[in-house]
Amino acid sequence: MLASYRQHEGGPGDFHRQSYRAETLDSTVDQDRFLFRAGREGYTYPELLQIRSGAAAQILMPSEQAKRRTRIVSTFIALAYVFVVGPLIGLLAAFSGFPIVAPIVAVVGFFVGLIGILVWWDRMSLPLLAENPRSIRDIELLGVQSFGTFQEIRARAQGEELRIAVSGSRGRLEEATRKAGFVFPSA
């Protein structure tokens, strides 16, 4: 999933789509920061692409501690959903007065909600994964090629050309790079 995280100091009108308030996670950072799931191999996205205003773009490899913390929170969120929302949906279906349609709608709604909450957490967990990364690699952005559901970024790091896959639309990636002061040359 493409997810961006934007930290900013601003009023209620400064909230943008795909942006999350930094105050809930780290109030000490006052510059724009965009995080995207990224990967250099296949369709896995084990790394993060970090784009900061006025700084070099970076590839972050999350630490084992950050990954473990994220998995623990993901597990708690899923269990809370299953054991709190599941019974509530079951009760609503049981007492709805529609004995055939209500259980089917309840089951479909339950699974859609479970997937939705896990996708939401996947986006919200990016700052947590970026804390104290195992490795940081500065990169120079060279271009982007769109493949519809994911983008391939051409970049250079220490003289080596890299190809980095980022899940999501080209427009969102270009919007983040533009807001951070980078200009993507056309591929």
Image: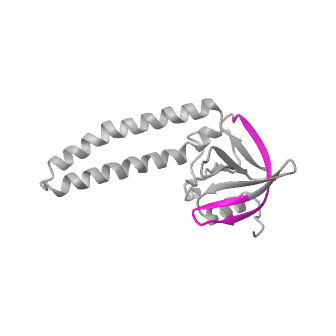
Task: Specify start and end residues of the magenta stretch as a single range.
Answer: 133-153
Side of 133 where 55 appears, left or right: right
Across and down, in percent, residue 46 comes to 62, 43
**How many discs appear?**
0
Residue in the image at 60% along x and 33% along y: 66
Residue in the image at 55% along x and 59% along y: 17
Across and down, in percent, residue 108 comes to 30, 53
Residue in the image at 20% along x and 51% along y: 103
Side of 1 where 182 appears, left or right: right
Nearer the observer, 111 or 95: 111
Q: Residue furthest top?
A: 65
Across and down, in percent, residue 27 comes to 63, 39
Q: Verify whether residue 136 appears in magenta.
A: yes
Residue in the image at 65% along x and 61% along y: 151
Side of 16 where 86 appears, left or right: left
Tell me the colour scheme of the image.
Answer: one colour
- Mark yes or no: residue 113 visible: yes
Q: Verify whether residue 57 appears in magenta.
A: no
Quarter of image, res 62: top right
Quarter of image, res 182: bottom right
Quarter of image, res 129: top right
Across and down, in percent, residue 31 comes to 71, 48
State the quadrant of the C terminus. bottom right
Nearer the observer, 157 or 79: 157
- Mark yes or no: residue 36 visible: no
Q: Is residue 50 above or below residue 62?
A: below
Q: Residue furthest right?
A: 159
Q: Residue furthest front?
A: 42
Q: Main secondary structure of the magenta part?
A: strand
